[in-house]
């Protein structure tokens, strides 16, 4: 099964450390690392790490766009990079050693013109896939239905469209695009519904999305509390394994990458959810903007399978 991931607003993730972060002072940093990032890029990285194959479709520009291409090539990840006039953003994560806190600085990124979006759409039409994953933020300067246009291309190919975005991108696509799976975080689901949620009301909100035809599968990531998955016939609530978190950056993307890979391999929804949770937790074991390691995912997945069979934590 072939997977294409879309990143209209990718980033270079710069992770570094400082002893103490203080205003107005020059902060000396150490241990800098640079990773290709953004939702779709991270999803492709995870699928590759877990032994699958994904092609990353990115819009990138400037010397930072060339750097992004080089970083992807070093992994290596097959990619189609659509050139844009704007400069690809650089996101900064600073780990403060004294407190253990992370400080994340994420630029909004360049605006995309209609002709640049058309070029991305044209590239998508030329790519064969069975799963098309649109993940990450929607850039400035694009219509709120931009992801609907990609979903329609995926539908024409007979591919399943997977959606993981927020704000205008999420509101603009749900109910207007043929979505197979949508993965909001718990906070994104609260924003989408306009109210505070608990476990029960989150289930109701997810059921509502499925019942309305917005998506066939709704899976809600809840950080250390695991995830919720709802289809027309199933409700699954599964907890994450207890770990010592080093950095949660990229955990949601890792969850989605592993789950999409599992579904593309024909595994059950429950097994795919378990695999996704294992990948999200494994990413939390890595510092900075590092994503999951295959060995950690396999170990945590085995632990989850045993725990589920022992005490039935996945409830339907």
Image (spheres, rainbow, N blue to C red):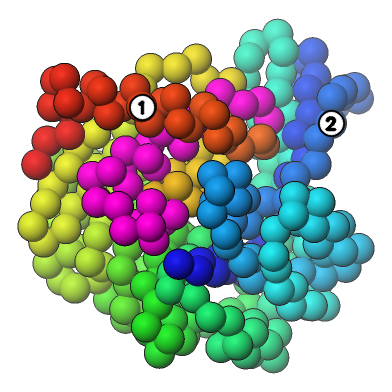
On the picture, is 20 further left or further right than 148?
right
Is the residue marked by circle 2 packed among few (<14), some (14-19), or many (20+) residues within 10 Å? few
Give the residue pinned by disc 2.
32
Disc with the residue nearer the chain's start (2 vs 1)? 2
Mark 2: secondary structure: strand
Taking the magenta stretch, the answer to whether it contains residue 183 is: no
Cβ–Cβ below 8 Å for labels 2 and 1? no
| Furthest residue toward top | 98
Tell me what residue is drawn at x 50 percent, y 38 percent.
Answer: 251
- Cα separation between marks 2 and 1: 33 Å
Q: Is residue 248 above or below residue 258?
A: above
Tell me what residue is drawn at x 32 percent, y 33 percent.
Answer: 226
User: Residue 309, how many percent across, how many down?
Assistant: 17, 26
User: Residue 130, how many percent across, how many down?
Assistant: 43, 73
On the picture, is 141 further left or further right than 94?
left
Tell me what residue is drawn at x 32 percent, y 38 percent.
Answer: 274
Report the disc number at residue 302. 1
Q: Nearer the viewer, residue 178 or 73?
A: 73
């Amino acid at each position: 099964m072939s997977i294409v991931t879309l990143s209209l607003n990718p980033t270079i993730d710069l992770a570094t450390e400082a002893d103490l972060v203080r205003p107005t002072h020059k902060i000396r940093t150490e241990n800098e690392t640079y990773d290709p990032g953004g939702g779709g890029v991270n999803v492709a990285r995870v699928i590759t790490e877990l032994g699958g194959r994904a092609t990353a479709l990115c819009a990138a520009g400037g010397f930072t766009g060339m750097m992004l291409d080089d970083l992807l090539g070093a992994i290596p990840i097959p990619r189609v990079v659509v050139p844009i006039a704007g400069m690809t953003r650089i996101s900064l994560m600073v780990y403060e050693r004294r407190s253990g806190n992370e400080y994340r600085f994420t630029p909004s990124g360049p605006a995309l013109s209609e002709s640049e979006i058309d070029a991305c759409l044209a590239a998508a039409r030329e790519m064969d896939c069975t799963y098309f994953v649109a993940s990450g933020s929607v850039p400035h300067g694009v219509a709120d239905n931009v992801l609907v246009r990609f979903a329609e291309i995926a539908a024409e190919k007979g591919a399943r469209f997977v959606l993981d975005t927020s704000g205008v991108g999420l509101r603009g696509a749900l109910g207007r695009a043929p979505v197979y799976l949508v993965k909001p975080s718990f906070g994104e689901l609260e924003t989408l519904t306009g109210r505070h949620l608990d476990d029960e009301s989150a289930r109701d909100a997810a059921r509502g999305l499925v019942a309305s035809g917005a998506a066939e599968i709704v899976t809600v990531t809840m950080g250390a509390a695991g995830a919720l998955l709802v289809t027309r016939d199933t409700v699954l609530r599964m907890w994450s394994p207890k770990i010592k978190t080093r950095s949660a950056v990229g955990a949601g993307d890792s969850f989605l990458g592993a789950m999409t890979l599992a579904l593309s391999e024909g595994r059950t929804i429950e097994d795919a959810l378990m695999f996704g949770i294992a990948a999200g937790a494994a990413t939390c074991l890595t510092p900075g903007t590092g994503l999951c390691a295959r060995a950690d995912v396999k170990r945590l997945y085995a632990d989850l399978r045993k725990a589920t069979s022992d005490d039935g934590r996945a409830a339907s």
